[in-house]
Amino acid sequence: MIRAEHLTLSFRDGQRRLPVLQGISIHIKRGEWVALTGANGCGKSSLIRTFNGLNIPTGGSLSAAGLDLRSSDNRAAVKRHIQLVFQNPEAQTVGSTPFEDVAFGLENRGLSRSVMLAKIEHVLGQVGLAHKAGADVSTLSGGERQRLAVACCLALDTEMIIFDEVTSMLDPAGRRDILELARQLWAQGTTVLWVTQRMEELAESPRVAVMEQGKMLYDGDPRTLFYASKLPEALGWPSAPVIRIGRLLRDKGWSLDSLPLTERELEAAL
Ligand SMILES: Nc1ncnc2c1ncn2[C@@H]1O[C@H](COP(=O)(O)OP(=O)(O)OP(=O)(O)O)[C@@H](O)[C@H]1O
């Protein structure tokens, strides 16, 4: 779905060039769930905006959904296949109601009115917003707006959705709702890139990529990251209670495979 090789990106800062991505190589297969993390300013947003055709790579190669993103035509076309959902999706909302917002994306698709109506109803139902189809978008909560952004992706049959720190401003119920929705879509075949700073979301992801200062420091499974690498301490990450207990078990000789990443795994292990 995504194949980046030695990808570089720099922005102009007056006379200087600011190197933001410094040789990123990553391959994300169709249907994968990958969590991406890294400190503020390390280049996560720049990377995902490059995957979505919004930034023009300075060097290296990048193909997304089979399109070579060094070509500007392909950078426009890739948005049909890969969509971003932001932490604060206000900027993404164009309609005054959820119905209008989804309809906007479907215009120019040559759909008959009845097919379009059925599709809008279906995708708003998928994200749990059918009852708010006609509501003023300004009355939606942050979590509902994010789910509306997901509905717009679904209406366009998007193959990959990149969630950019969507849980960071939500309350626990809102976080659970958007995470569950993303997991459902993943189970149905959508490729997911989940950008987060939350340790528990990393621990629950099958694959974790860690960036620092424009470079990819780690790309692999979370068990190795949390229990067999020095990276979490080196980066000063706070450790989740489950991981702290898991480290005690590791020090008592438990094998890597048996160490828990989630509360459920901890309960089962004990
Ligand atoms: N359009 C731009 N022009 C110039 N500099 C930019 C631009 N976009 C990002 N940068 C700079 O690139 C660097 C990486 O920013 P980026 O937003 O990609 O990091 P991030 O890891 O997503 O951070 P955060 O977690 O705070 O969102 C920062 O130094 C930022 O100031």
Image (spheres, helix red, strand yellow):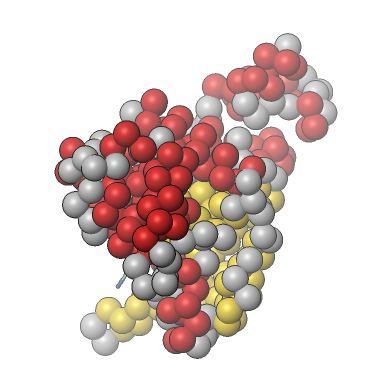
Task: Count numbered badges in the picture.
Answer: 0
Tell me where residue 242 appears, x and y as whole percent. 59, 23
Reply above or below: 204 against 209: above
Residue 20 appears anywhere in the view: no
Left or right? Give the position of 33 relative to 145: right
- Quadrant hosting ligand 1: bottom left
Reply above or below: 250 against 9: above
Reply above or below: 121 against 263: below
Left or right? Give the position of 44 relative to 16: right
Quadrant containing the N terminus is: bottom right
Tell me where residue 112 appears, x and y as whole percent. 41, 64
Q: Nearer the viewer, residue 34 or 134?
A: 134
Left or right? Give the position of 133 relative to 64: left
Quadrant containing the C terminus is: top right
Residue at (45, 30) in percent of width and height: 176
Residue at (64, 37) in percent of width and height: 226
Residue 157 appears anywhere in the view: yes
Tell me where residue 116 appears, x and y as whole percent. 40, 58
Left or right? Give the position of 69 relative to 228: left
Tell me where residue 117 appears, x and y as whole percent. 38, 53
Q: Nearer the viewer, residue 141 or 136?
A: 136
Residue at (58, 72) in percent of width and height: 64
Q: Quadrant of residue 130?
A: top left
Going by the picture, which residue comes out furthest to the top?
Answer: 270
Residue at (71, 42) in percent of width and height: 224
